[in-house]
Amino acid sequence: MFVYHGYTGKLASLLSSMNIEPGDRIKVVKGGEVFEGVLMPRYTIRSGEDILVIKLDNGYNVGVKIEEGSQISLLSKKPRVERRGRIGEAGGRRGEIVLLSTGGTIASKIDYETGAVVPALSTEEIIEWAPDLADIALFEAREVMSVFSEDITPEDWERLAREVYEEMNRGVAGVVIAHGTDMMSYSAAALAFAIRDKPVPIVFVGSQRSSDRPSSDSILNLKGAFITAAKAPLAESVVAMHASTSDEMIAVHRGVKVRKMHTSRRDAFQSINDKPIALVNPYTGEIKIVGRILRERDRGRTPILEGRFDNRVALVKAYPGVQPEIIDFLVDKGFHGIVIEGSGLGHIANRLIESIKRGVENGIPFVMTSQCLFGRVNLNVYSTGRRLLEAGVIPLEDMLPEVAYVKLSWVLANKSRDLSEVRKWMLTNLEGEITYRHTLDLFPRWPYE
């Protein structure tokens, strides 16, 4: 049986004879209807022999049944994009963008031969899949690791930090990191702390929907990330993702103030107790600053690598019925630090306080955050909070629980395990992880004014 890019039978023969391939722009006239768009590969299992798959200009795929009298014409061939150059190559300009892949949905493309979604890791593959990126900046792409984001470890943060630090020392204009979305905010926070005095942006980007889906956000997110890395006037670790469910803008969130707030929406990432730093128009390249920039871009600045993380830190959530044995276990197992995701203003059951006190007496720092996310902890209001303070718990203002986990891991590995020093560093606002003054609008949503 003759198979042509997933098509079979008469349709395969017709497309082959006309030299029409996936990626080419075609027109189908059927009865009184006209369909124009890009030919897609056929998913053999899902489609019949006579179904032609076209991606319309609105981004959606449509299956057109080719019948007697249907007319197919080739409008234009898929553009053959030449390589624009790579950083450090002879003839290529230095100081542009490097794309580092850690895995995840974003680092994939449609295989026009099979219709499957496969990794797109080389510079050439990325340009072929998303040619507009080469118009934003010269870049090179490479894989640092290939792991599901739920499998990311503090050791992976250390490796990633070293890679980014080396690229900054080479003089790049920005670093883009393709990352799975589920744990992306943890990694963005880790890189915020791991590289001090950043000269250029570190831009994390992911995709909620893979590139074979008509509603994929991968290319627009990637374009927004590239524009941010190449042109934004900031030098921070940020997350660039859809600002709304439509394809209007990409929001640039500070890496220590962002959380994934929805399992599948394209605007899943939201800044907490803060506004995004900027909005990026992926079509025009315009960057609108809507928040605060803590560190401006300065390619003359020399970065400092403090990229170690302590993997003996735990994050404990307060819940009804939580048992003291959980704290006792962590203390007895020699964990070096414990983050509590407390209720409300920063509480956990009184029955755990003696266990917490024992841990502090053994030199283990306990820090308090709130599972409410919006607002800040205050251990002075109720008696439980005051008892926690007396036990030695460190309240962390409005720091997100996952950011507190990352920062405590970083402080213990790079600064000190002395309790007084840990307290000092955890309460020092290094990367904007603490917002001292909140606006009345606790739930900033699109559009950001």
Image (tube, rainbow, N blue to C red):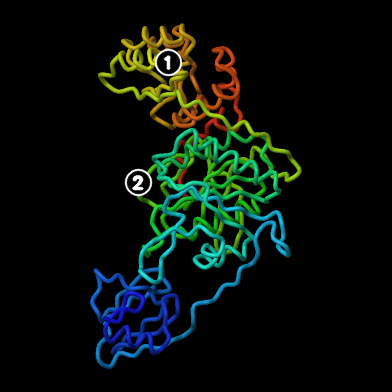
* Residue sitting farthest toward the front: 1
Q: Which mark is residue 263?
A: 2
Q: Could you say which quadrant of the image residue 349 lies in? A: top left
Q: Is residue 240 visible?
A: no
Q: Look at label 1 and name its amino acid.
A: Gly
Mark linked to residue 364: none
User: Considering the numbered disc 1 on the image, is that residue within a helix, a strand or a loop?
Assistant: loop
Quadrant position of residue 68 = bottom left
Q: Quadrant of the N terminus?
A: bottom left
Mark 1 → mark 2, Cα distance in angstroms: 34 Å
Q: Quadrant of residue 84?
A: bottom right
Q: Could you tell me the amino acid type at mark 2?
A: Thr
Classify mark 2: helix, strand or loop. Answer: loop
Near-viewer residue (197 or 287): 197
Residue located 44% across and 75% down the image: 23
Q: Residues within 10 Å of mark 2 (few under 14, many from 20)?
A: few
User: Could you tell me which residue is drawn at 46 percent across and 6 percent down?
Assistant: 361
Pinpoint residue 292: horizontal percent, then vertical percent.
61, 40
Q: Is residue 235 above or below residue 230?
A: above
Q: Is residue 62 above or below residue 366?
A: below
Earlier residue among tags 1 and 2: 2
Residue 436 to residue 100: above or below: above
Q: Nearer the viewer, residue 1 or 253?
A: 1
Is 436 in front, or is 409?
409
Report the residue that reaches farthest toward the right: 300
Foreground mark, 1 or 2, reads 1
Question: Mark 1 sits on what residue?
Answer: 334
Residue 101, x across and y down, in percent? 51, 50
Residue 36 rendering spot, x and y as whole percentages:
40, 81
- Residue 383 horizontal side relative to residue 70, left or right: right
Pointers 1 and 2 in contact (C-beta within 8 Å): no
